[in-house]
Each structure stands twice: as C-alpha cells, then as structure tokens.
Image (cartoon, helix red, strand yellow):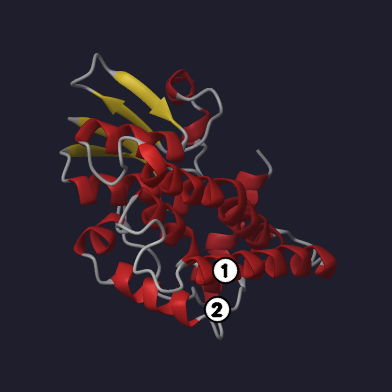
Amino acid sequence: MIELYTSATPNGHKASVTLEELAIPYQVFPINLSANDQKSSAFLDMNPNGRIPVIKDKGNNDLTIFESGAIMIYLAEKTGQLLPSKGPARSEVMQWLMFQMAGIGPMMGQANVFYRYFPEKIQPAIDRYQNESRRLFEVLDQGLKDKQWLAGDYSIADIANWCWVRTYRWSGVSREGLENLDRWLGQMKERPACQKGIRIPEPPPKRILEGDQRESFVKGAQSILQR
C-alpha cells in the first residue's frame, strides 16, 4: 500500500495519475496548503522542503519519497511499467520528464504567480513567463509530430507534461495552432486513469473560477506564496 500526501495541483496530480495508471493501491492524505499543513513538523519529517506530493511505501519499510518526478520514477520502476528499464527508450522518457520538471512546470508556475496571484500586475514578468511557456508548448508540439506519445510509447513523460499543460488557461498561455499538442491533450483527457487522477484529493474547479470563488482561490494562493 502506498500512502499519498498531496493536494489538487499539477505536481500532486502527477503522482495520483501515475498511481491510477499503474493500478497501485493507495491511500490519500489530503494536505491543506492554505492551512500550512505542508509546513507542519510531521510533514517536514517526510519532506524537509515542505512541498507536495510525498509518498510512503508501506510495503517497503515505509520508504518515503518526495519530489513528483522522483515519485513517478520510483512507481514506474516498482511495477516495470511506463518507463523502459534501459537503453535509448528509457533515455527518451527521461528527457521529456526532465523537460517538464525543468521547463514546463517552473515556467507555467511563474506565469500563474504573476498573471493570477501577485497583487501587483507586472506586465513584463507576465509576458516573460507566458511567452516562454508558449515556446515550450511549441517544443512539445514539434516533439509530438508523427508520434502518438512523447517518447513513442505511453509513459510517465506524457503524464508529467499533461498534468501541467492541461492548465494552460489558468496560466494565460495560448495553444492556438498547435495541432499535435491538441491531439495529444485530447488523447490524454480520454484516459480513465487521467480522469480519476486529477480528481485526487478533491474535485478540481470547473473551467475558470468566477466571482467570489475565484477571489477566494487567488487569496489562498497569495497566502501560500508569502510563506
């Protein structure tokens, strides 16, 4: 049994979608970021960086792993699925996984900060991160040319990138004209494990939040940024 400590964020969904795709039994422990659960001593004992997600493998001496990419690799290797064991095929999956971790995630994350959460609208910063996110979308689009999945076969690389790219509206990033990316997004959305994984630990907001709901969400995100 895997214990999953997580919240409804793209990085959290990387872990939950992977668990669903691999059909590994797991128990969810929701972490309330607005309540600062991730800074509690109990959580910091699992991840000194105070970030979700974290897993604990009860069947492997309570092995605890933090960082979403490391979690995905561990789970894939544990089951022998979604990540080739060696050779060029493994390298290709790892490249696209690192592409998400080093590029898509940080750039879209900063776009969210300056476009949605930062109290002062600093247009050069908004433009910088939205434009870079769009450039990375174009890299994905090119990488998907004549391929169904990023690394040939379906893998953790597809899961990692999808969990972020699917939130493009919230980041204010256009996907116009990216036909390969659109096709891939549609394929991912139809997968039952993807549909279930993004509803862990609670259902996500429908489309873009409106009115008081949006204001409450943004205020919560702003408070997290200040910690």
Between 139 and 50, the one nearer to me in the picture: 139
Percent of width and height locating residue 186: 34, 76
Q: Which residue is mark 2?
A: 175
Q: Which residue is mark 1?
A: 137
Q: How many marks?
A: 2
- On the picture, is 40 further left or further right than 127? left
- On the picture, is 107 further left or further right than 34? right
Percent of width and height locating residue 63: 31, 19
Which type of secondary structure does the marked residue at label 1 adopt?
helix
* Mark 2: amino acid: Arg
Q: CA distance from mark 1 to mark 2?
A: 7 Å
Between 105 and 96, the one nearer to me in the picture: 96
Q: Which quadrant: the C terminus?
A: top right
Q: Is residue 118 above or below residue 171?
A: above
Label 2 environment density (alpha carbons within 10 Å; few <14, some 14–19, many ≥20): some
**Corner quadrant of residue 184:** bottom left
Q: Is residue 29 above or below residue 48?
A: below
Residue in the image at 30% along x and 72% along y: 187
Q: Which quadrant: the N terminus?
A: top left
Percent of width and height locating residue 21: 22, 51
Which type of secondary structure does the marked residue at label 2 adopt?
loop
Q: Does the CB distance between marks 1 and 2 fall below 8 Å?
A: yes
Q: Is residue 34 above or below residue 109?
A: above
* Mark 1: amino acid: Phe
Of the numbered discs in the image, which one, if any, rests on residue 220?
none
Label 1 environment density (alpha carbons within 10 Å; few <14, some 14–19, many ≥20): many
Residue in the image at 48% along x and 25% along y: 47
